[in-house]
Amino acid sequence: MDPALIKSFEKKYNAQVKEFFFETDEIKEGLLLESKGKGYDVVLSSGIRIPHYIKQNWLAKISQSQIPNLKHIDAQWRNIRPEIADFVVPYLWGTCGIACRKDLVKKEITSWLELYRPSEDLKGKILMINDSHEAVGLGLKALGYSLNSEDKHQYDQVRDLLLQQKPYVYDYSYVAVNPQSSLVTGEIWMAMVYNGDGLMLQELHPQIAFVIPREGTSLWVDYLLIMEQSANKE
């Protein structure tokens, strides 16, 4: 969030905002599980885990009368998962793709398989998101399957694909989005990234391309949630 927005909120409501950051939904879930959702007022989360949070009674319902600006948000983003609509405010949506250094990767990247079955010169030059939903789900796409597959045999194939890819992976983490980023410095040549960060990386280096592979990709929505145990719901 824009730091100026945080300062404005603090001044208007005489509040002190303390922000906690995480790389993936799985890390965030670990933080929430430690306290059973207590200790946080507002949480940013992708939609995939929110039904679980509702079952855990972690979330407070969102009062539309208290948030009149909801009328400016296209209803599809609240209704994409009808079971969570009463608990969420959509914040961002986007996709996942491949960011690569065009000056270092000589071949034009068009397929997920070029990330999962990389050429020999990419050994130790790849960064993968440390999140099973993306790493496994987009592995399914690479092999031509549905990201939402329920076929165990297809998951076995993705396991083998990831094990074959491992020697080429520099790290399972998230690429930094600053001038010292390993993709900007050339320490890595290719990374799985979300679209917003792909665009920011392009601003930092003219030779970084962001690609949505031809097999397709995931669509994600991030929501703002109010925690049931918050003492500051209003």
Image (cartoon, rainbow, N blue to C red):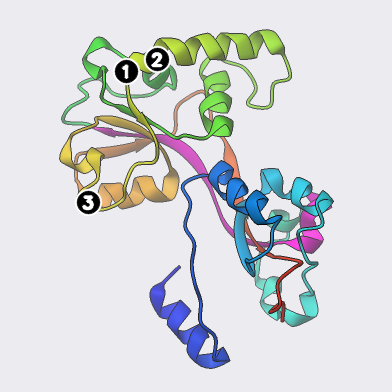
Q: Is residue 131 above or below residue 214?
A: below
What's under tag 2, amino acid-wise?
A: Gln
Whether tag 2 and tag 1 are in contact, CB under 8 A, the answer is yes
* C-alpha span from label 3 to label 1: 25 Å
| Residue at x 57%, y 9% (from the top left corner) | 157
Quadrant of residue 116 in the image? Answer: top left
**Mark on residue 204?**
3
Residue located beneath label 1 in the image: 168
What secondary structure is found at the residue carrying circle 2? helix
The kind of secondary structure element at disc 1 is helix
- Which residue is labeled 2 in the image? 165
Q: Is residue 159 above or below residue 134?
A: above
- The range drawn in magenta is 81-101
Q: Of label 3 and label 1, which has the lower sequence position?
A: 1
Q: Could you tell me the amino acid type at mark 1?
A: Tyr
Say which of 73 and 164 sits in front. 164
Magenta span dominant secondary structure? strand
